[in-house]
Image (tube, helix red, strand yellow):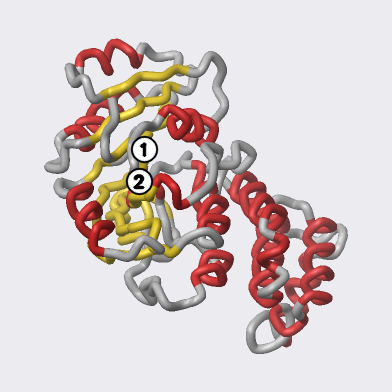
Amino acid sequence: MTVSVSVVLPTYNRLLSLKVACESVLNQSYRDLELIVVDDASTENLRAMIDDLGDDRVRYLRHAQNGGASRARNTGLAAATGRFIAFQDSDDLWLPGKLERQMELMNSLPDSVGVVTGSKILYGRDSAHNYGPGKVTCAPPPGQILKLEEDQVRRFLEGNRISLQNTLFRRECFPGDNWFDPCAKANADWEFTARLAQHTKIYEDIEPVVLAFISADSISTNTRKKALGLLRILKKNRAAFAHYPDVHTKNLIQLARMLVRLGKRRMAWRLIRAGLKIHPRSVIGKDGFSGVIWRRFRNSLAPGSRA
C-alpha cells in the first residue's frame, strides 16, 4: 500500500495513553496515511490494543530487544511508504486538522522547503523550564519565529525549535533511513535537526498542532541524558560548528554547566578552556561570564568545591 503520509509512532509500554495517541492520528481530516507503531520490546500487550483499533491503515512492528525511541523511529522510517513523513509520541495528542493544515502549507511552499513545523501546547512545564503539575506553556516560544531567509544552520546549532510530533517532512529532505542517533538518549530532536538544517529549508508555522504532556521523570528533565545528547551534537557537527565559533563555544559552556551539576568539574573545566581557545568573548565578556560571575563559576570548578 502506498500512501501520501507515513506516521511513525515509537512506543515502550504506555498502554493507557497509546490508544488515544493513535486515535488522534487516525481521526485526522486528512486520511491518506499509514500509522506505523513500532513496539520497542514492551512488556505490556500492545498488539491486542492495536488490533482493537480496527483500522487497516495501522501497521505494527515489534523489536525483540529495547533499543530506545531513536532506533524505533529509524525502524519505522525504513518501513514507511509515504512521500511525506510525520511522527507521533505515545503520550501526546495531535490536534484536529494538524495534518491537513501542514499538507496544505507544504504544497504551497517551494520544493527547497523540506519541512513544515508547528508548535505544541505543553502541560507539565512552564516557559522558564520549571516542571510540575499545573504548569503550561507553548513550545517553541512564539518569539523570534524561524524565517526561511535567515541562516537556519546557525539557528539550529544554537538550539532546537522542532519537536518531531509537531512536524511534517518530505521523505527526501534527509538522506537514508537512519535519521536519528540511538546514542542520543535526550536532545534527540535537536541532535537530528542540527543535521537536518544542513540539508533543507524549514518553514515554521506558529499555530499549535499538538497537545503534549511532560512528567517529572521525563528524559527532558534528566541532566545526565541531556548532557550526553549535547555531547553527540557537538561531536557530529564539528564541520558545521567550525563556521560558527561563537555558537560552538556557547554550547561548550552549556555542557560545562551540566557537568558541574553532575559533579564532573575537571571535565567541565576542560570544556571551558577549549571554549576560551575557540571564541574567548563567548566565555568572558558581554556575551559570556564577567567579573564576579566568572570568578564564582571558576571557583565552582575547582577540586573540592561544591557544585
How many C-alpha atoms fall within 10 Å of the one at disc 1: few (<14), some, or many (≥20)? Answer: many
218 to 285, vertically: above or below: above
Q: Earlier in the sequence, mark 1 or mark 2?
A: 1
Marks 1 and 2 in Cβ contact (< 8 Å): yes
186 to 23, vertically: above or below: below
Q: Secondary structure at mark 2?
A: helix
What residue is shown at x 35% (from left), y 46% (from top)? 165
Tell me the residue that label 2 is attached to: 165
Q: Position of residue 241 (x, y in %)?
A: 68, 67
Tell me the residue that label 1 is attached to: 89
How many C-alpha atoms fall within 10 Å of the one at disc 2: few (<14), some, or many (≥20)? Answer: many
Nearer to the camera, 31 or 145: 31
What residue is shown at x 51% (from left), y 42% (from top)? 219
Q: Is residue 279 visible from the viewing direction of this image? A: yes
Q: Position of residue 286 (x, y in %)?
A: 65, 88
Q: CA distance from mark 1 to mark 2?
A: 6 Å
Work out which residue is located at the far right of the displayed protein and give it: 303
Nearer to the camera, 153 or 95: 153
Q: Position of residue 246 (x, y in %)?
A: 67, 77
Q: Is residue 221 visible from the viewing direction of this image? A: no
Work out which residue is located at the far left of the displayed protein and give it: 29
What residue is shown at x 56% (from left), y 71% (from top)? 154
Q: Amino acid at mark 1?
A: Asp
Q: Amino acid at mark 2?
A: Gln
